[in-house]
Amino acid sequence: MRGVLLRVLYPVLTLTVFGLYPSMTIGPKEGWQVYSSAQDADGRCICTVVQNMSQSIEVLNLRTQRDFQYELKEKMAELQPLIPVLEQYKTDAALISVFKEEIRNLSVALTTIQEELGTYDYDQLYQRVLRLDGRLRSCMGKLTCGKLMKITGPATVKTSGQRFGAWMTDPLAMTRSNRVWYMDSYTNSKIVREYKTMEDFVAGAVSRTYSLPFKWEGTNHLVYNGSLYYNKYQSNIIVKYSFDSGSVLAQRALEFAGFHNMYPYTWGGFSDIDVMADELGVWAVYATNQNAGNIVVSQIDADTLHVLRTWNTEYSKRNAGEAFMICGTLYVTNSHLSGAKVYYAYSTKTSTYEYTDIPFHNQYFHISMLGYNARERALYAWNNGHQVIFNVTLFHVIKTDDDDS
């Protein structure tokens, strides 16, 4: 039966295989291809048929291309955000190149400057600065003590503290030193703040804080040659306190001087005793019963606090707004409020007085401290919680070398 069936189908298979039925023929790129054939003993066709390798490879190739394109598309999608980063990197790289070139140029310039400075010895430069400073001071020394002509300003340095207080610099400090001392309030305090420079003072950068052995009264304190001079609380005693040693170097009572609001300035505040300095030294201004409450001026020894000489004026201490000394002359303001002016001047050189009319701008309407700094030729003031500086104009007589001979 199997043999009969094969004999019947053999012609059909033969035609199909060898292309006699073109519509049914599978071309070499479409199906199976016979590479060799043989018959067995019974006449049966033995065909060695293999899959068209070309077609398989092409299909595989097409599939690989599609997969590759899909994977490449995915990778490109992942890399797409990096494009701006790469662009920025290109820009940054250009900037870095510019910076490198600038640094090279700067390095050359600094090397040149260093070589030029290296030709000078530091000690030589320092000595030159000292000589210039000496010549400047010599020139200033030829300006004899002058008469107050004008007050300008103020320049507001800082706004801080209470309505009343004191701040000052040392008129005898070295040129390179510009320390500032700050004493907030007019009573019941012992804390003094020190600032290394005026810039630190403005910035509030305290360099050191001192706790005094005694509380102070008033706001009319003085820093002179590294020491603080102030009126001891509830007494007529002047205390000299050294900032360097942190100890009291001297203390002495002003005989008969009123204190604790007995003879204050017009604004009160226990401002009975005013310690001040000028080109001639240290002074104390106060009032006594013996002088009917009028102002007394005493020049005192800066070391021992002994009174060297005293002058009695006829100006009521209670009618004075504030006072300061310039070149041995006491200048008194008529008020601590708006419209204040320097109204009275007393010369210790001639023991005479005169009434003056030198206005100044009381910008913040209430002055509770006014002190002269001879080195800076300026007035330091505490103006209603504002620390301000006034400039002064003096009438000078120029000393020549012939005058010294």
Image: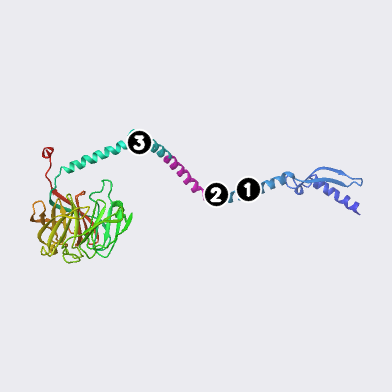
Q: Which residue was labeled with disc 2?
A: 79
Mark in the foreground, 1 or 3: 3
Camera sees residue 202? no
Q: Main SS type for the magenta part? A: helix
Label 3 environment density (alpha carbons within 10 Å; few <14, some 14–19, many ≥20): few
Q: Earlier in the sequence, mark 3 or mark 2?
A: 2
Find residue 366 and report its image quarter: bottom left
From which residue to which does the magenta span run?
79-99
Residue 130, compared with residue 66, is above or below; it is above
How much space separates mark 1 and mark 2, taking CA atoms?
16 Å
Q: Which amino acid is tagged 2?
A: Leu
Q: Earlier in the sequence, mark 1 or mark 2?
A: 1
Q: Nearer the viewer, residue 393 or 268?
A: 268
Q: Nearer the viewer, residue 6 or 90?
A: 90
332 left or right, relative to 124: left
Callout 1–callout 3 Cβ contact below 8 Å: no
Callout 3–callout 2 Cβ contact below 8 Å: no
Q: Which residue was labeled with disc 1?
A: 68
Percent x, y for residue 401?
13, 38
Residue at 16%, 51% (x, y): give it: 392
Q: Nearer the viewer, residue 378 or 79?
A: 378
The C terminus, quarter of image: top left
Residue 101, compared with residue 331, is above or below; it is above
Q: Which mark is residue 113?
A: 3
Q: Which amino acid is tagged 1?
A: Phe
How much space separates mark 1 and mark 3, taking CA atoms?
64 Å
How much space separates mark 3 and mark 2, taking CA atoms?
50 Å
Assess whether residue 81 is covered by the magenta stretch.
yes
Assess whether residue 187 is covered by the magenta stretch.
no
SS at circle 3: helix
Percent x, y for residue 402?
11, 37
Label 2 environment density (alpha carbons within 10 Å; few <14, some 14–19, many ≥20): few
